[in-house]
Image (cartoon, rainbow, N blue to C red):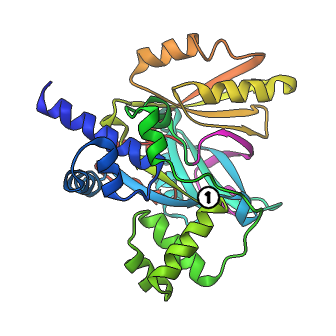
Amino acid sequence: MKENSMSSTLDWKIIHALQVDGRAPFSRIAEVLGISPQTVSRRYSRLRSTGALRVLGLTSPDALHEEEWFLRIQCAPDSALTVASALARHPETTWVHLTSGGTEIVCFTRADLGSEPGLLRKLPETPRVRGITAHCLLHTYYGRELSTINKTGPLTDEQVNRLRPGSPRPTGSADLTPADRKMLHALRLDGRATFHDLARTTGWSQSTVQRRLTELRQQGLLYFDVDYAPDVIGYQKLIILLLSVTPGCLNAAGEALGQHRETAFVTSTTGPFNLFAAITCADTRALHQYLTGPAAALPNVVQMETVPVIRTLKRAGLPTPVTSAHNAR
């Protein structure tokens, strides 16, 4: 095996380990992978510095009395990138994709429970915006702390079990203090921020930071996700798949779709299409095989639309690194 191939395989293993537990100590990852902690630290630092990998601390919308929405925004061909760039800078957006040959934007945002996204009041006044549709996400079948690498990664089940943190015990909605919110903001920027840095951010002691971080994870409010460049593990194509399924088969179709190795995110949604999925494939040939194989076998699909993503400007609430390809939502 060539050196660059061995390097890619080891990087892939480290990414998989961090997807299982984004806060796992390098010493534990090293023990599971059978390498030195220095090697894990060095490779993680290189991946992070090049923008190929970011560990993010993210929050559950349910626990924060929030709903997630996705918006489809049609623009004049010469203005879609400008509008998408502005949306990527907007604090309310979490994901921003340029799609459909550069004339449409798909973006995700959050709003307080029972409220419409604030962007819906502003976007109609934006010059060159020709149409907007908004869809509320209802039930996630696959996603959040899980990604395609959980289904396709190189680690064995035994290695995953050794790395996996304890299962969360959701306790409903949570009341957060100002210090909690400071810590969550810091973790969104760097999910592996040290206890020392988090203590300095919150004004707490390191032991208090460690205890509170553990509590938020156990409550299901805080989880960790890995944002990585798909070309590190061979994925080049990101496609948004929209399905209309008869209501009686919606759960069966959503659960089956979530099990496909190509799906990174699957949710039910309002609107004429009641299933949304983010699909990752190596190339257009692999996409064709997926659409005519596993996707075609889904039960009671009435209508299907594929929306190619040509550029991602923001993901998981952060602008995309210039040096990395898009990840999937």
Which image quadrant: the N terminus? top left
Residue pointed to by mark 1: 126
Nearer-the-camera pick, 227 or 93: 227
Nearer-the-camera pick, 312 or 138: 138
**Any magenta on residue 129?**
yes
In this rendering, would 174 be left or right of 223?
Answer: right
Residue beneath the point at 57% across and 74% down: 212
Q: Is residue 310 above or below residue 187?
A: above
Instruction: State the image quarter where residue 67 is shown.
Output: bottom right
In this rendering, would 77 be left or right of 218?
Answer: left
Kindly state the secondary structure of the residue where label 1 is placed: loop
Q: Position of residue 180 (x, y in %)?
A: 59, 77
In this rendering, would 252 be left or right of 86?
Answer: right
Q: Position of residue 91 (x, y in %)?
A: 56, 66
**Any magenta on residue 149?**
no
Does residue 52 appear in the picture of this structure? no
Instruction: State the image quarter where residue 45 is shown.
Output: bottom left
Which image quadrant: the C terminus? top right
Residue beneath the point at 44% across and 78% down: 198
Does residue 266 appear in the picture of this structure? yes
Q: Which residues are magenta?
A: 117-144
Residue beneath the point at 27% across and 53% down: 44
Q: Position of residue 172 (x, y in %)?
A: 77, 62
Label 1 neighbourhood size at 10 Å, few (<14), some (14-19), many (20+)? Answer: few
Task: Kindly give the residue lying farthest to the left in the view shown.
Answer: 3
Q: Amino acid at mark 1?
A: Thr
